[in-house]
Image (cartoon, rainbow, N blue to C red):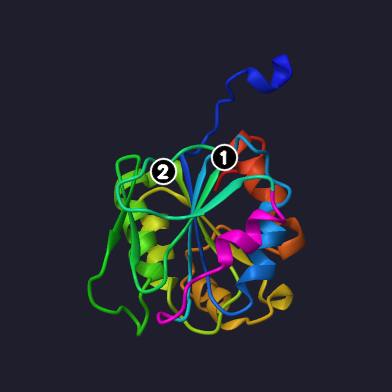
């Protein structure tokens, strides 16, 4: 560890929340691979088959610099970590902690992107970024509005660069998305925003 690496970094945001569904592995890999190891904590909901064990964390772990793990109830949200919602559990956030809930389906989904984003909006407000990536339904659009209304920053993958366009298109259609970028530029935008060098809406 060099002296530079050991110095604390002041990030403008405390938490990044990402929602995705179909086409998510490629989009997540592209987003995360250019982010620094010390980046603020990231929480991810990807729609998964509720009856199967998820391998998303282990697949991502091989391709990105952060520590990637399946989220556990009550664990702290730490910089440099990416927390993936487990199958058939809603992922929410408390003050600096993960909260899992097995409450009812939302938009036929558990985990629900809307529930994650709404909890992030309520807990982190202007210190949060909501990100919508590739997916084939409209889950997360209402949650993006909640983050925007709470003073957070909202980002969507340019639908043209998405394997499945419906989810980012639905988010953009709310009129509450601050930045729309191709997936190849997503990581750099998030880094710039968190460093304070990106344009804040």
The residue that appears at 30% across and 59% down in the rendered structure is 100
- State whether residue 72 is above or below residue 53: above
Are discs 1 and 2 less than 8 Å apart at CB? no
Q: Which residue lies furthest to the front in this view?
A: 53
Quarter-wise, where is residue 149 in the image?
A: bottom left
Q: Which quarter of the figure is the N terminus placed in?
A: top right
Region of the chain picked out in magenta, as a range: 50-64
In this image, 110 relative to 32: left or right? left
List x then y, in percent, for residue 4.
71, 18
The residue that appears at 64% across and 67% down in the rendered structure is 157
The residue that mark 1 highlights is 80
Label count reads 2
List x then y, in percent, for residue 50.
40, 79
- Residue nearer the viewer, 84 or 144: 84
- Residue nearer the viewer, 5 or 183: 5
The residue that appears at 73% across and 48% down in the rendered structure is 34
List x then y, in percent, for residue 56.
57, 66
The residue that mark 2 highlights is 126
Q: Principal SS element in the magenta part?
A: loop
Tell me which numbered mark, 1 or 2, is placed earlier along the sequence. 1
Check residue 54 for magenta coloring: yes
């Amino acid at each position: 560890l060099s002296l530079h690496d050991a110095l604390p970094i002041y990030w403008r945001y405390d938490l990044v929340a990402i929602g995705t569904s179909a086409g998510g592995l490629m989009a997540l890999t592209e987003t995360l691979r250019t982010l620094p190891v010390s980046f603020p904590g990231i929480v991810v909901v990807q729609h998964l088959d509720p009856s199967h064990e998820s391998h998303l964390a282990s697949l991502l772990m091989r391709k990105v610099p952060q520590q990637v793990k399946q989220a556990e109830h009550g664990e702290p949200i730490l910089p440099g970590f990416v927390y993936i919602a487990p199958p058939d559990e809603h992922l929410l956030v408390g003050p600096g902690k993960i909260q899992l809930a097995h409450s009812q389906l939302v938009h036929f989904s558990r985990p629900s992107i809307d529930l994650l984003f709404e909890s992030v909006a309520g807990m982190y407000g202007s210190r949060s970024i909501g990100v919508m990536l590739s997916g084939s339904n409209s889950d997360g659009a209402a949650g993006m509005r909640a983050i925007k209304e709470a003073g957070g920053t909202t980002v969507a993958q340019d639908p043209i660069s998405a394997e499945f366009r419906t989810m980012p298109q639905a988010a953009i259609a709310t009129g509450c998305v601050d930045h729309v970028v191709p997936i190849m530029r997503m990581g750099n935008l998030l880094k710039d925003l968190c460093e304070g060098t990106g344009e804040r809406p």
